[in-house]
Every structure is written in structure tokens, then in C-alpha cells.
Amino acid sequence: MPAIFTHLIHPGEFLREEYLLPLGMRAGALAKRLGLPRTRIERIAKEEIGITPDTALRLGKFFNTTPEFWMNFQLAWELRSKAKEIEGELSRIEPLQRQAA
């Protein structure tokens, strides 16, 4: 498996370690500021669920980032997780060889 797939960082881990902990902010407090149920942010921070477009829009606005930042993080995590899960199947796929014209 390529090195890119070896270390998985869930967006919830990133949210927790890079935003919540340094700011001394609890998940419930962030949820309130975002107008979301407390359990949604808690479950993201516990890495139980991923980030939805709705949540990405709110996180982007609050943290002065972009929603794409959060969605790209989520997509990268999902792709890496799935690649690790189906590594054996992927290794059996022969890439298309284009013939020179």
C-alpha cells in the first residue's frame, strides 16, 4: 500500500486536537455556537461519525476556514480508510496500459 494510506487521521481527531483542546473549548460549547446538537460535535470529536456538508459549512464559518477544507479532510479520510480495507482487492487490479499511437 502506498505510504499515503498508512496513517489515518479522522477529521474528529483534527478538530479535537487542533481546535477544541488548544482553545479550551468543549464539544458542547462548539455545538451551541454552531447551532447544532451537542451530540453531533461530541460524536465527531470521538471519531464516531464524519463531517457532513452542513457541519463543514458551520465549522468553516466559525473557524474562518472553508467548508471545502473540512469536506476534503473527510473525503481523504474515507478514501484512505476504504483503500486500507480493500488493499488486497486493489493489489489484484492491473492498471490499463495505453498503447502508443
Image (tube, rainbow, N blue to C red):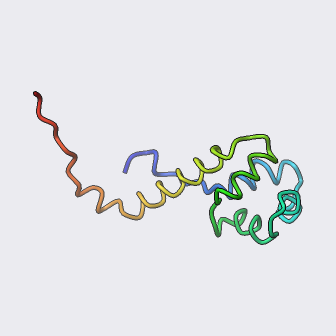
Residue 17 image offset from top left, x and y in percent: 75, 52
Figure quadrant of residue 12: bottom right
- Determine whether 52 is above or below 94 in the image: below
Tell me: 68 left or right of 22. Answer: left
Residue 83 image offset from top left, x and y in percent: 41, 57
Furthest-bottom residue in this view: 39
Total tally of numbered discs in the picture: 0
Q: Residue at x 88, y 62 (%)?
A: 32
- Determine whether 101 is above or below 16 in the image: above
Q: Residue at x 29, y 62 (%)?
A: 89
Figure quadrant of residue 43: bottom right
The C terminus appears in which quarter of the rendering? Answer: top left
> 99 and 91: which one is in front?
99
- Determine whether 15 is above or below 29 in the image: above
Residue 59 image offset from top left, x and y in percent: 75, 51
Furthest-top residue in this view: 101
Q: Residue at x 82, y 53 (%)?
A: 21
Figure quadrant of residue 66: top right
Q: Residue at x 77, y 67 (%)?
A: 42
Tell me: 32 left or right of 57. Answer: right
